[in-house]
Amino acid sequence: EFVEMQQKLSSSIKKKSNYGDQYGEETTSNTNLLQFLQHQAEVFDEFSSFFNSSEACPPEVQPLLHFIVSKFLTQIRQNKKSTDQNEEETYKIVDVGCGTGVLFPFFMSIAHDMSLKEKLENDIKLQIMGVDLSSKMIQCAQERVKSLIAAPTEGGVDQKYNFELVANDFVSLILDNSDGDSDVNEAGGTNGHVGKYDGVMVNACFGNFLDTDAIMTALAKCVKVGGIVCIAHPLGREFVQRLHEEDPNTVPH
């Protein structure tokens, strides 16, 4: 039922799109890229209310998301142990295409459960940067964070989980501030995102990126050496392929 609902949503997006067929698969000019990004922002702005509803994350999908996030955080923790990093260090994570923040409660609850299971003296702390092209999605994510974070108290969850929400194109955010293989921008400053994060999550949105080489480069640049890059979709490759076939302007891959 969820798959059918998502397919209907995709068809609705396609009907409302004015983007048409002006973008060709082999066209990569800056003008067309900007048009593509504008199209994506408009589409997901318009459907932000749906993605902020319980319909977008029904009970049958939640165990899949829990599995994905659990594997992701577990691998980050194993990496920290193997490299003898300070276990009290905050886990720095990027949620690419975070949407309305559907993964945020999973990050928080799983990190908490991991702390209890391993009987850590200090709970795992998370610093999460959520990035999405849609400003309305980010607004919804901000409201979700407000509902998740408790009132400030000593040792409260607000001190364990920190969120930074950014309305921007992730590739531009990472690559536009760096020059090729250098991490120094034209003004002589460094890109604060390069080599900063323990892990980066791309959930249910990889197919929406126009240039797969660019997104992979950005993902690799933003993580620390040995950092985790997780690309996932709870409904799998075949579902994404169907979305692509129905609306390649919104899901180009």
Image (cartoon, rainbow, N blue to C red):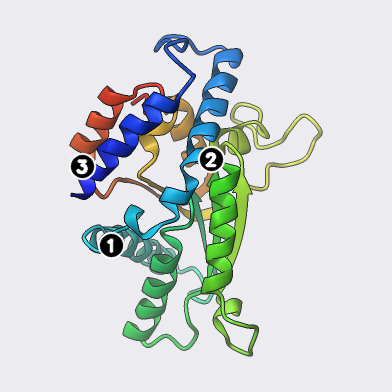
Mark 2 to mark 3 CA distance (whole Å): 22 Å
Tag 2: amino acid: Asp
Q: Nearer the viewer, mark 3 or mark 1?
A: 3
Image quadrant where residue 3 sits: top left
Q: Earlier in the sequence, mark 2 or mark 3?
A: 3
Instruction: Give x and y (percent) for residue 165.
Output: 60, 54
Question: How many labels were placed on the picture?
Answer: 3
Query: In what element is the residue under mark 2?
Result: helix
Residue 62 got which mark? 1
Q: Secondary structure at mark 1?
A: helix
What SS does tag 3 mark?
helix
Of the numbered discs 3 and 1, the one sitting upstream in the chain is 3
| Crowd rating for badge 3 (residues with CA inside 10 Å; few <14, some 14–19, many 20+) | few
- Amino acid type of disc 1? Gln
State if disc 2 and disc 1 touch (CB < 8 Å). no
Q: Residue at x 43, y 63 (%)?
A: 83
Query: What residue appears at the point 71 percent right and 36 percent down from the top-left corner?
Result: 184
Which image quadrant for residue 12? top left
